[in-house]
Amino acid sequence: MAQDKVRVGVIGCGAGLFHLEGYAAEPRAEVVALAGLDTDRCEMLAGRFSVPRIYRDYQDLLAQEDIDAVSIAVPNFLHMPVTVAALEAGKHVLIEKPLARHVDEGKLMLEAAERTGKILAVSFQRRTRHDVEIVRDQIACGALGRVYYSKAYWMRRSGIPGLGSWFTSKEAAGGGPLIDLGVHVLDMALYMLGNPVVTTVSAATYSEIGPRGRGNWVGRRTSQGSDDPVNYEVEDLATAFLRFEDGGTLLLEASWASFTEMDDDFGVQFYGSEGGARIHSKKYADVDTLDLFSEIGDTTTDSHPRLVSRPGHAQIINGFVDGILNGTPVSPDGEEGLDRVRLIDAVYRSAALGREIDIAEVG
Ligand SMILES: NC(=O)c1ccc[n+]([C@@H]2O[C@H](COP(=O)([O-])OP(=O)(O)OC[C@H]3O[C@@H](n4cnc5c(N)ncnc54)[C@H](O)[C@@H]3O)[C@@H](O)[C@H]2O)c1
């Protein structure tokens, strides 16, 4: 890199916003180009973040030799082709979650990173939360004892991100709330547990509300792709039971639309032999979200740490830029992204087959 700053392109002008905010907080990087099909949104972002160049075709952005790295925030079916093209164009890549729609695509992405020697980082920004850091440290130092049971969930009352958009197309998205929201809390849980080895998955998926044209999250996203308002091919609720090699288990739930008191809430809860921990976030809150359960002597004790708010994408981008400039390992990396995709694959496969499956069956 000839210049002193990492020169970045952002592909995708929806969640690309979070990346632009993150780079704006990173003095060692500069966004020099945007790409997206929705010209209005891209122009608005370019104006707001003073980005000099806009392209419609991502290939045109990738052809720019002065760009060192790209953030990719496009629909899931484009994650693999855009990432592989970017790596082969010599760019480091920060890809939005999920890494890919399924394992085969994910493997092609990791192979491209290996082949080109470029960084492949994944935007699971929720693992940078203060509550997650505390719980991960508590588990790592043994304060919870042996953690034998965990729950992870993300439940919305009415939050399908655009009926008829790419989100509700099985081909375009790879799945519904499980691959969209569940993958975040799955990553959080496994990260806090220190990445236990998952051996089996038993799952079921349901599609009760979306196909009837209900449960939409009106006004939050523009629709790309199909214009059919009742095109709904994915689940609207998924539930899964994962077994770990160490005997522990994890219950995972994800829904875009369900009759529950939860509005747009996610959380993770851990049950250990010496203590417990619960993160519960209502509508994306990142403070006042953590309870720790323990004993002082023979007295039952609950504590509620005072948390600070952290901008997730900015932290991920800080690590990505460190990786580019200093060679420090990125977190999460492509391997962890692929591990989460493998588990999502296993959940969908188990639900389709109606039986527990061995992770080895996924490949
Ligand atoms: N980490 C998070 O919390 C988070 C939040 C929201 C979305 N996401 C992820 O970000 C990705 C995009 O989601 P979104 O909500 O922004 O979707 P969106 O539909 O709102 O935006 C998609 C963007 O991709 C662009 N695009 C589509 N095809 C393109 C092409 N061929 N070339 C260039 N640009 C193209 C569109 O023009 C648009 O700007 C998804 O993978 C989603 O899972 C992550």
Image (spheres, grey):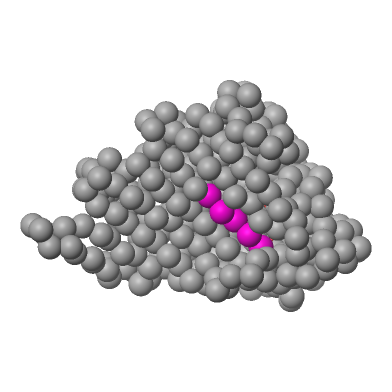
Q: Nearer the viewer, residue 126 or 27?
A: 126
Q: Residue at x 32, y 43 (%)?
A: 147
Q: Which residue in the rendered view is the most extreme toward the right?
A: 228
Q: Is residue 268 magenta?
A: no
Q: Residue 305: horizontal and vertical position, in percent?
A: 26, 67
Compared to 98, does 104 lie above or below?
Answer: above
Task: State left or right for residue 25 relative to residue 287.
Answer: right
Q: Residue furthest front?
A: 354
Q: Residue at x 64, y 51 (%)?
A: 238
Is residue 361 shown left or right of residue 241? right
Q: Quadrant of residue 280?
A: bottom left
Q: Residue at x 73, y 70 (%)?
A: 215
x and y percentages locating residue 60 in the rendered image: 79, 47
In this rendering, position of residue 93 left or right of residue 195: right
Magenta segment, which residues?
A: 252-256
In what quadrant of the picture does the C terminus appear?
A: top right
Query: Main SS of the magenta segment?
Result: strand
Spot the residue most to the bottom. 219
- From the top left corner, tell me how far across and down residue 229 is, in percent: 88, 66
Residue 253 magenta: yes
Q: Picture quarter containing residue 322?
A: top left
